Image: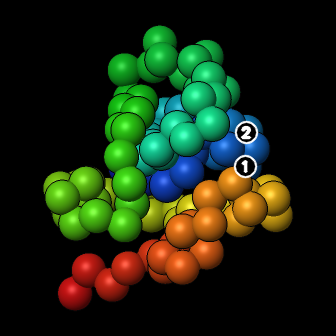
Amino acid sequence: MTYQYSRDRGAGYIGSTLVPRLLEAGHKVTVVDNFLFKQATLNNCCHYDNFLPVKGDIRTERTMLPLLKTADVIIPLAALSVPRSAIWIPLARKRPTMMPLR
């Protein structure tokens, strides 16, 4: 059985190791990331037909609602993982990582 996975911040360290494994197992994977640090960690996944990268912000309904309707599993890992990120991007500390959709 295969699942439709939706991953936020999929281009980060955990996503860049998890996403290829899900694809190799035959799952459909949608990754939502704002690519703030211009990472190319998922380039090796682009040849999979079941891979959909989405550049967007998980805090906006416009980005997330259509994706949530098709996902069987959601793996939320959105966070600025580098502590200095709060210095580089002061507003990131003041915004919620996740927002309720209902």
Asked if residue 42 shows in the view, the reply is: yes
* Residue 75 percent coordinates (x, y): 53, 63
Under circle 2, the secondary element is helix
Q: Quadrant of residue 63?
A: bottom left
- Is 9 on the left or on the right of 53, as rendered? right
* Residue 83 percent coordinates (x, y): 82, 63
Q: Residue at x 48, y 17 (%)?
A: 46
**Which disc, if any, is residue 32?**
none
Marks 1/2: CA–CA distance? 5 Å
Is 77 drawn above or below residue 67 in the view shown?
below
Residues tagged 1 and 2 counted as in contact (Cβ below 8 A): yes
Q: Amino acid at mark 2?
A: Thr
For the rendered model, the colour scheme is rainbow
Residue at the right extreme of this rendering: 83
- Residue annotated with mark 2: 17
Asked if residue 21 shows in the view, the reply is: no
- Residue annotated with mark 1: 14
* Residue 62 percent coordinates (x, y): 18, 58
Q: Nearer the viewer, residue 67 or 1?
A: 67
Q: Nearer the viewer, residue 74 or 90?
A: 90
Q: Amino acid at mark 1?
A: Ile
